Image (cartoon, rainbow, N blue to C red):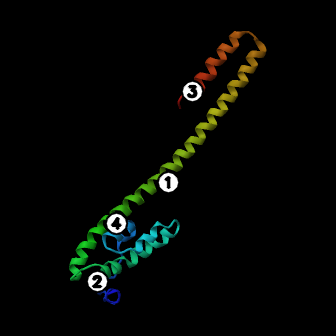
Amino acid sequence: MENQVQTKTIPEGVKQWNWGAFMFSIFWGFGNRTYWPLLCIIPLFNFIWMFVCGIKGNEWAWRNGNYSDVKTFKLVQDTWNRAGLAAFIISLIFIILYFLFYQTTDKFKWDKLLSRYLMIKRNNRQFLLMRKNNPSREGLFYHNIIVNSQRYARF
């Protein structure tokens, strides 16, 4: 019985890229009774195997499925292809947005932290000069107002 499955000829219209097998490898494999995509569970190897699933996915699905003609097969796989392509585009958009905003917010965070550090350092210098000139408790009180109000102020 297995020899019949392996020798099943693959029509020319079936051999093409499958976005569903590429993006949803494991789920696509269960849905098409193809278990090679389970190798995507292996860390790091899955990045390579996703491409193999995208390339060989239609062939595996044709061999393991009970499709009578290419038209029926394409109708089923077109649904997977649309979903996989949509997931790929959405993932790509999120990755691009992440790197665009991560770069700007990361730079902003460091600038903000540096300016706060310099402000606190300047205020501590002012406090030490104030304490040296006026060792009373008033200097401490005014220093707390100056430093704490600027330390916790939002930019």
Upstream in sequence: badge 3 or badge 1: 1
Q: In 3D space, how far apart are the residues under numbered discs 2 and 3 (Cα atoms)?
A: 66 Å
The quarter of the displayed image where residue 74 is located: bottom left
Local SS, label 3: loop
Badge 2 amino acid: Gly
The dot on residue 13 is: 2
Q: Which residue bears the numbered disc 1?
A: 99
Give the crowd class for mark 2: few <14, some 14-19, many >=20 residues within 10 Å: few
Residue on which disc 4 sits: 85
Does residue 26 appear left or right of residue 68 in this picture? right
Q: Residue at x 33, y 62 (%)?
A: 86
- The amino acid type found where label 4 is placed reads Leu
The residue furthest right is 132
Q: In front: mark 2 or mark 3?
A: 2
Q: Earlier in the sequence, mark 2 or mark 3?
A: 2
Write the residue at 55% across / 27% down: 153
Q: Which residue is mark 3?
A: 152
Q: Given contact means CB atoms under 8 Å apart, are the residues at marks 2 and 3 in contact?
A: no
The residue closer to the viewer here, 17 or 24, is 24
The CA span between labels 2 and 1 is 39 Å
- Name the amino acid type tagged 1: Phe
Q: Residue at x 51, y 65 (%)?
A: 43
Counting from the top left corner in percent of width and height, residue 76 is at: 25, 72
Task: Please name whichever residue, 42 or 150, is drawn nearer the observer in this view of the structure.
Answer: 42
Task: Report the side of 119 relative to 62 (left or right).
Answer: right
- Judged by depth in the image, the label closer to the viewer, 2 or 1, is 2
Which mark's residue is nearer the viewer, 4 or 1? 4
Left or right, residue 55 beside residue 136: left
